[in-house]
Image (cartoon, rainbow, N blue to C red):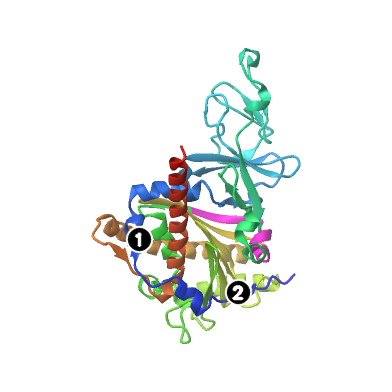
Amino acid sequence: MNMQRTPTKSASDEEIARLGTAPIPAEPYYRSEYFELEREAIFKKTWLNVGHVCELPQPGSFIVRPIDAAKASLLITRGRDDKIRAFHNVCTHRGTQLVEEACGNRSSFTCPYHAWTFNYDGKLRAAPDFERFYIDKSELDLPEVAADVCAGLIFVNLDKSPSQGLRESLGPLAEQLEAMPVARATGFSEWVYELDANWKLIWDNFQENYHLRFIHSRSATPACGEDNPFGYAVNFSFYGPHRKQLIWSNPNSTLKPTQKFAFGKLAAFAKADGLFDNPHIKDYFALFPNFNIVGTPTGHFSQCVQPISATRSRSVVRMYWVGEDENATERFGRELSMASTMEVHAEDTSVLEAGQRGLSSGALKYIHFQSQEVLCRHFFDAVDSAVQAYKAERNAQGATT
């Protein structure tokens, strides 16, 4: 099956012009008051990526995911009916977190406090001395959270009644994602790190190539060439709060012998499997609010930026793979691909934290974006629109009570 790059309709000059050219206020990048609004308006109401179906290979499989911005821990399970479900990781007796392990396989989950036991469909199975309680057992199932899957990626929505389903939210991007190899990924490499920076500041860094030649002059060499010396994106497109760009790579880039051996072999494996029609044009999907994924000839790179506070965030970086390593060469290529990704992120860290220190000082009233940072502007508009809509809704509710 030929997993070709899906066509992207470039945003028109008129669409880009509608975003405007005005500076962006700096306070939302460090004010705790604004972060509290983001928590309520976005992270408790939006579809969030929490993993991939390959982490739940069989009935009874489970993973636990913290959602710091919502002050929540989620238990995601695969049931006997093969359905993937998500629950708040809290015992319905006294609120104790039910599961401490990050992942595993069980037929049930028992609270460490008073041994209340739940099935992996969230039903309360047993509770010692339950006849002494004053409530029916059926009313004490684990609180369920909306969960759905697209392209093998698991998403949850903490809103009790989501205004949109996952696919409705993604629009045409759902079909495009399904056509990518990540949809049939069987494993991944992962790197998790934290840094002292606002989640939006980090996100902006990974959706513009304006900084490549300054921060990644060595590691980003493949992204630049005579036809595109600064490695700028080919085009941009917008899908509601989501956005996309096509990233260009120099087909004539000079790689070190080790890179040529590893990446060349890995790209050849991908091409033989029919994964990419043009390895020098890469799809970059930025799914609102905090997940991006890039298709490359050597694998699928994804990043989920999880807010912890107004000025601290966690970055979850993954490289998704299809199939097991066929040989030592492929294994080496995958390891080097992940190591190279980690190196790029490490190069960004100090600059991002320095940027946060500068913004948190309050010295700047505005941030300025240029035309190659149009995705950053679109992203901020999507965030602020959600925040302002939430404030208006809250004020309207207050006026009627």
Q: What residue sits right under mark 1 in the picture?
A: 352
Q: What residue sits right under mark 2 in the picture?
A: 8
User: Where is 335 relative to 37, above or below?
Assistant: below
User: Where is 147 relative to 225, above or below?
Assistant: above
Q: Which residues are magenta?
A: 177-191
Seen at 53% across and 35% down, the residue is 100
Q: Residue 184 in magenta?
A: yes
- The numbered disc on residue 115 is none
Kind of residue sitting beneath label 2: Thr
Residue 175's x, y, as percent? 67, 64
Q: Nearer the viewer, residue 172 or 56?
A: 172
Residue 128's x, y, as percent? 63, 17
Mark 2 crowdedness (10 Å alpha carbons): few <14, some 14-19, many ≥20: some
User: Where is 258 relative to 102, above or below?
Assistant: below
Q: Nearer the viewer, residue 374 or 192?
A: 374
- Total labels drawn: 2
Q: Residue 304 in magenta?
A: no
Asked if one can make out residue 364 in the rendered structure from this viewpoint, the answer is yes
Residue placed farthest to the top in the image? 132
Secondary structure at numbered mark 1: helix
The answer to which quarter of the image holds residue 121 is top right
Tell me: 259 left or right of 269.
Answer: left
Kind of residue sitting beneath label 1: Leu
Disc 1 to disc 2, C-alpha distance:
30 Å
Tags 1 and 2 touching, CB below 8 Å: no
Seen at 66% across and 64% down, the residue is 181
Seen at 75% across and 69% down, the residue is 1
Sequence order check, earlier mark of 1 and 2: 2
The answer to which quarter of the image holds residue 229 is bottom left
